Image (cartoon, rainbow, N blue to C red):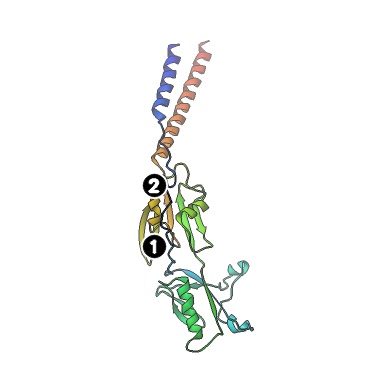
Amino acid sequence: MKFYTTVALLILTLFTFSCKVQKAIPTYLDNYKDSAGTDIVKMPELKIQKGDFLSVQIYSLSLDPKAYEIFNLPCASASTAAAGATTCGFLVDDEGNIIHPRLGAIHAAGLTKQELAASVKNMLVSPKELLTNPTVLVNYLNYKITVLGEVRSPGTLSIPETKVTILQALGMSGDITEYGKKSEVKILREYNGKREIGVIDLTSSKMFESPFYNLNQNDVVMVDAVKQKKDKTSQDLIIARTGFVMSVITSAILLYNTFRR
């Protein structure tokens, strides 16, 4: 009887030391009291970077589509793209230019979509009017955000829009798990060959003032685990090992009692 009492006390001791009181998990905007009088933060227009892949579509009021079709690249379907067909996009090269087959080199890096569209439109009407009342549409073809760490669906997101906040990106990734560190979310950003890492506190209203609240194309969002997860992992390991040891002890006792008879 004394043996079983000792084993029971051992198990109770292990559980007592392995189980700790968990702290309250922080939520978004934990210290945000009142939104009255809060300034609205305007999202800045993204600047085109070297290495971006852009769609540049040109249209005209001309009734003859052939008048402006010659200014647009042929688009490959999903079936022909694998065979090496030309896609309807322009790569921003190391000089910051896109090379248009009809208009030549056009500087793009450092411009917004609207500024690039205005530049292309100006080339179509001056000095010679190549098209009548042209319309130019510019869009990103490689606008992607990667979300890693303590989120429910980590991975790379293809963003249909060109404006996305860190909260929207996390929402697309299934939100931060209960073990994600909301107070120290990291954003890895590369701009013109230079890398920088920003940290944003999602529990504070000051996150709206951060230059990393609005994400750029190719940003990487990293959510670390809180200390509670590491503690829980250690607790689970202790419990698993305790269960294994107890199963071995129980088996040994059964064998001992069997052969003792």
Is 191 rendered above or below residue 97? above
Q: Give the alpha-carbon distance from disc 1 to disc 2, as whole Å.
A: 22 Å
Amino acid type assigned to the residue bearing label 1 in the image: Glu
* Residue at figure coordinates x 43%, y 56% from the top left: 220
Q: Residue 110 location in percent, x, y?
A: 40, 71
**Observer-nearest residue: 241 or 49?**
49
**Observer-nearest residue: 149 or 249?**
149
Q: Is residue 53 left or right of residue 187?
A: right
Q: Nearer the viewer, mark 1 or mark 2?
A: 2
Q: Which residue is mark 2?
A: 183
Is 237 rendered above or below residue 1? below
Q: Residue 139 location in percent, x, y?
A: 51, 69
Amino acid type assigned to the residue bearing label 2 in the image: Ser
Residue 193 visible in the picture: yes
Badge 1, how many Cα within 10 Å: few under 14, some, many 20+?
Answer: some
* Residue at figure coordinates x 44%, y 27% from the top left: 242
- Secondary structure, mark 2, is helix
* Residue at figure coordinates x 50%, y 56% from the top left: 156
Please tell me which of labels 1 and 2 falls first in the chain.
2
* Residue at figure coordinates x 51%, y 51% from the top left: 171
Q: Which residue is mark 1?
A: 190
Badge 2, how many Cα within 10 Å: few under 14, some, many 20+?
Answer: many
- Secondary structure, mark 1, is strand
Is 49 rendered above or below residue 220? below
